[in-house]
Image (cartoon, helix red, strand yellow):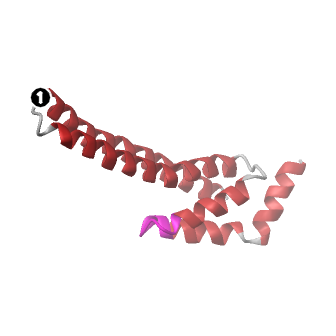
């Protein structure tokens, strides 16, 4: 479970870094267009905002559950198992690395040993 928790944390952090890069990639050109004060180019700022915003939201949908699942798994929280199952299903859509993480996550979460370990850690 610790390995899965660490992998989910890394996946979540990488997603946040991707979101920051997307903001920079779409924000810098938008700023340059605004600074140019060309009325024709001003329409592009809205397109940059919509596309960049959509990508950031999409990345967040995949990254935030992974990060939260990683924290929960490392602390052996009882809510971490269903949360990780949901995050793992979302990972399946992110080919190729997310798919591998999703399959591994589902495999670990549906093992009887995992359920017993979470139960034992919360009773102690």
Q: Quadrant of the N terminus?
A: bottom right
Q: Is residue 51 left or right of residue 102?
A: left
- 98 above or below 71? below
Depth check: 19 or 122 in front? 19
Q: On the rendered structure, is 21 left or right of 92? A: left
Residue at the outermost front position: 39
| Residue plotted at (85% across, 57% down) | 119
Position in image of residue 35 (x %, y %): 14, 27
Residue 38, x across and y down, in percent: 9, 33
Find disc 1 in the rendering and name its residue: 37
Q: Eyeballing the image, is 14 above or below 101?
A: above
| Circle 1: element type | loop
Image quadrant where residue 94 sits: bottom left
* Residue at image coords 15%, 33%: 32
Asked whether residue 96 is drawn in magenta, I would say: yes
Q: Residue furthest right?
A: 123
Q: Residue at x 11, y 39 (%)?
A: 40
**Quadrant in the picture for residue 109:** bottom right
What residue lies at 66% left-to-right and 63% top-to-bottom? 85
In the displayed structure, 70 sits above or below 115; it is above
Instruction: Verify whether residue 121 appears in magenta.
Output: no
Image height of 109 relative to 18, above or below: below
Q: Position of residue 113 (x, y in %)?
A: 78, 68
Q: Nearer the viewer, residue 50 or 73?
A: 50
Q: Position of residue 17 (x, y in %)?
A: 39, 44
Segment colored magenta: 91-99
Left or right for 49, reference 14? left
């Amino acid at each position: 479970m610790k390995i899965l928790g660490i992998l989910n944390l890394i996946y979540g952090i990488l997603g946040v870094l991707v979101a920051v890069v997307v903001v920079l990639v779409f924000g810098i050109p938008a700023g340059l267009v605004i600074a140019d004060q060309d009325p024709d180019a001003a329409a592009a700022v809205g397109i940059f905002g919509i596309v960049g915003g959509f990508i950031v939201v999409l990345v967040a949908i995949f990254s935030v559950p992974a990060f939260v699942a990683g924290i929960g798994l490392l602390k052996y929280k009882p809510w971490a198992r269903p949360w990780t199952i949901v995050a793992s299903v979302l990972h399946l859509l992110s080919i190729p690395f997310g798919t591998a993480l999703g399959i591994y996550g589902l495999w670990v979460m549906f093992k009887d040993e995992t359920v017993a370990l979470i139960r034992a850690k919360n009773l102690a």
